[in-house]
Image (cartoon, grey):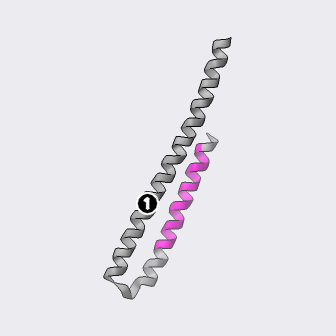
């Protein structure tokens, strides 16, 4: 009976650790995605400065979508 309780506690600890690792990976992926998108947007603005406003607007929308997906991922990690 004591072994069963210890195994349950170990499983709970591993689940919490897994949720933390998953949330960290989601945040890392979002950071890389936004960094890539920002770099490509700056390259595009450098090549065609006359459409900088449109590129900037699209880049902001993409960044918001990446952040929304990251938020869903973090919430899902902590719900599991």
Residue at the location (59% across, 26% down)? Answer: 11
**Which of these two is toward me, 73 or 28?**
28
- Could you say which quadrant of the image residue 4 lies in? top right
Kindly give the residue lying farthest to the bottom in the view shown.
50
Q: Say which quadrant the C terminus sits in.
A: top right
Give the magenta part as a residue range: 59-77
In this picture, residue 45 sits left or right of residue 8: left
Q: Position of residue 13 (x, y in %)?
A: 60, 30
The quadrant of the picture occupied by the N terminus is: top right
Question: Is residue 80 rendered to the left or right of residue 60?
Answer: right
- Res. 69 image quadrant: bottom right
Measured along the vertical axis of the image, is residue 21 above or below residue 35?
above
Q: Does the magenta stretch mainly form a helix, a strand or a loop?
A: helix
User: Residue 54, image x and y in percent?
Assistant: 45, 82
Q: Secondary structure at mark 1?
A: helix
Specify whether residue 15 is painted magenta.
Answer: no
Residue 68 location (% of width, % of height): 56, 60
Q: Tell me the residue at 42%/63% (across/down).
A: 35
Name which residue lies at 49% across and 78% down.
57
10 horizontally vs 21: left or right:
right
Q: Which residue is mark 1?
A: 33
Residue under the point 38% across and 69% down: 39
Q: Quadrant of residue 38?
A: bottom left
């Amino acid at each position: 009976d004591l072994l069963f309780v210890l195994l349950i506690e170990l499983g709970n600890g591993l689940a919490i650790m897994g949720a933390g690792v998953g949330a960290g990976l989601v945040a890392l992926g979002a950071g890389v995605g936004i960094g890539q998108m920002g770099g490509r947007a700056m390259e595009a603005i450098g090549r065609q400065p006359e459409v900088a406003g449109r590129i900037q607007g699209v880049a902001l929308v993409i960044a918001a979508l990446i952040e929304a997906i990251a938020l869903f991922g973090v919430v899902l990690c902590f719900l599991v």
